[in-house]
Image (cartoon, helix red, strand yellow):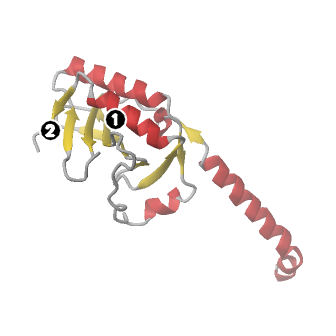
Amino acid sequence: MKAFWEKHKKALLRGLLVLLVLWAVWYARPVDIHFLLGNAAPDRTSVLVIDCTSPYSRQSRNLDPEDDPEAAALTAEVLAELEGLRFHRSPLEPLLRILPPMGGGSIRHGEDGKKEYDIYFYFYDIRSEEDWDTLLGLQCWIDRWSYGPYLNLPLYVSHGHEAGRELGAALWESPFASDSKS
């Protein structure tokens, strides 16, 4: 075995490197919101939109209707807004999943005077009145997208800054939005 390794070491290492590169390219391919949800259909969606244009004044709105028909309409609206986006996962994600969550990034705010938003999405599967399963947590923080149980798994979204602004503005003006009581 040792002689085989010494004889074919370069070829085996190159083959392993090619497989690793192919896997990384495949893993980072664009996926949609349904893929991130595991192709499950959420029963309910909760959204928190924070206007973080100014570092000194934060206003927030909740989108979490109590009424079941309104909750279904909100879920459909949010999914429709997110369906046009394509998310690219980091090839390092399997490693990030086993590491403990590392703190958040630096506090940022808008650079060009335009409205900026911090948006938290939570999609739920409701089994019973007391038993809710969180299917997905997704966050857009100005231009940084992330998801996962601790919102610590990075996502790349093409033109993510503009997409976050448009999504934040649409959700801010949504008929389901109500001012936060914080």
For the N terminus, give its image quadrant: bottom right
Image coords of residue 161 (percent x, y): 45, 43
Mark 1: which secondary structure? helix
Image coords of residue 9 (percent x, y): 83, 75
Residue 175, located in which quarter of the rendered image? top left
Mark 2: which secondary structure? loop
- Residue corresponding to mark 1: 168
- The Cα–Cα distance between marks 2 and 1, rounded to whole angstroms, is 15 Å
Please give the name of the residue rendered at 76% of the width and 59% of the height, measured from the top-left corner. 18
Disc 1 residue type (three-letter):
Gly
Please give the name of the residue rendered at 33% of the width and 52% of the height, measured from the top-left corner. 109
Q: Is residue 42 toward the left or the right of residue 29 in the image?
A: left
* Label 2 vs 1, first from the N-terminus: 1
Relative depth, front residue between 147 and 38: 147
Which residue in the rendered view is the most extreme toward the top?
A: 69
Residue 3, located in which quarter of the rendered image? bottom right
Image coords of residue 48 (percent x, y): 25, 39
Please give the name of the residue rendered at 16% of the width and 30% of the height, measured from the top-left corner. 178
Please give the name of the residue rendered at 84% of the width and 73% of the height, measured from the top-left corner. 10
Q: Is residue 51 toward the left or the right of residue 138 in the image?
A: left
Marker disc for residue 56:
none
Disc 2 residue type (three-letter):
Ser
**Quick one: label 2, few (<14), some, or many (20+) residues within 10 Å?**
few
Which residue in the rendered view is the most extreme toward the front?
A: 113
- Residue corresponding to mark 2: 180
Image coords of residue 54 (percent x, y): 26, 48
Relative depth, front residue between 117 and 157: 117
